[in-house]
Amino acid sequence: MSDLGALEGVVLVGAGNMGGAMLSGWVSGGVKPQNITVIDPNPSDRIKGLLDSRGIRHAVTPPDNMKAKILILAVKPQVMYAVLETLHPVIDEETLVISVAAGKTLSYFEERLGALPMVRTIPNTPSMIGRGVIGAFANERVGAEDRTKADILLSAVGHVEWVGDEADIDAVTAVAGSGPAYVFYLVECMAEAARKLGLDEDLAMRLARETVIGAGALLDHSGEEAGVLRKNVTSPGGTTAAALSHLMAEDGLQPVFDAALKAARDRSRELSG
Ligand SMILES: NC(=O)C1=CN([C@@H]2O[C@H](COP(=O)(O)OP(=O)(O)OC[C@H]3O[C@@H](n4cnc5c(N)ncnc54)[C@H](OP(=O)(O)O)[C@@H]3O)[C@@H](O)[C@H]2O)C=CC1
Ligand SMILES: O=C(O)[C@@H]1CCC=N1
């Protein structure tokens, strides 16, 4: 068992922003269409197009004529309870359950689905282009083979970090699961600040967007630490130093990020029940 093409009986429940992003990654990574089923009452046109073009089985509700070998739960935490109630026809004692839901703990799933091998993960939306970051924690029923299967599925959409303490998943959610939104908001803030300096709105957005894309690519390709790359931009007494004197002040970005990530971590904990 070493690749996506060898995985059978994969069932994805919920093909929205996150489930759909992962599905795209699996399809490009070579999952066999006959080995995957998508359960979603109302998939988007993009997902419908993907399912139709690849001949992937789609069901509106869990079919009663199949058992999932790997069941991926990707519905909103708020509807998880109702969805789990419907899933008993597609699981048996060997089904490997993989949740991507923020907050929901393995004990929450064990109470409702029984004592199954389970993996709690938190991915992020760059999974859609194979550049996700995924935190994962497995319960004690996950043996070596199931762990390999989960790792194959998750690695197909990005960089996987297995953690040894389930509680860490809440913090992983705060930094990586929600993280892309912070970066996109940074682009919006930089564009708005540039507009206020008098630049045309579209030009301001293009400059902010391309700068963040370029900086991310440099971080990736150079292999340098972020702090080193920051210093490379910062000429003593220059323009960057003037800007960073605000961003790195005692009341600058660090306390804002401290509070923001703590709020996300705490919200993840609240969603557990
Ligand atoms: N978005 C993100 O960046 C991340 C999300 N997550 C987690 O992923 C999960 C999904 O979030 P997200 O993709 O953003 O949400 P979405 O609402 O985009 O996707 C959920 C999908 O599930 C569908 N759905 C609703 N009811 C059922 C059902 N009974 N059976 C099957 N499918 C159903 C929804 O359909 P409909 O729209 O018609 O209700 C929708 O297509 C959440 O638990 C979230 O915490 C984790 C990490 C990152
Ligand atoms: O906002 C959320 O709750 C989900 C989980 C992480 C990213 N999106």
Image (spheres, rainbow, N blue to C red):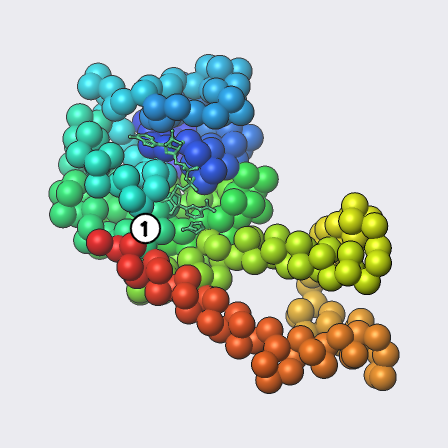
**Residue 235 visible in the shown view:** yes
- Residue labelled with disc 1: 120
Q: Is residue 130 left or right of residue 55?
A: right
Residue at image location 48% in from the left, 20% down from the top: 48
**Residue 221 visible in the shown view:** no
Q: Is mark 1 within 8 Å of ligand 1?
A: no
- Which quadrant of the rendered structure holds the C terminus? bottom left
| Front residue of this view, candidates 84 and 76 | 76
Residue at image location 84% in from the left, 58% down from the top: 198
| Position of 46 relative to 245 (above/below) | above
Residue at image location 28% in from the left, 39% down from the top: 79
| Front residue of this view, candidates 107 and 245 | 245
Position in image of residue 99 (x %, y %): 32, 44
Position in image of residue 174 (x %, y %): 44, 61
| Position of 35 relative to 154 (above/below) | above
| Position of 153 relative to 194 (above/below) | above
| Front residue of this view, candidates 44 and 160 | 44
Residue at image location 73% in from the left, 72% down from the top: 230
Q: Is residue 107 left or right of residue 70?
A: left
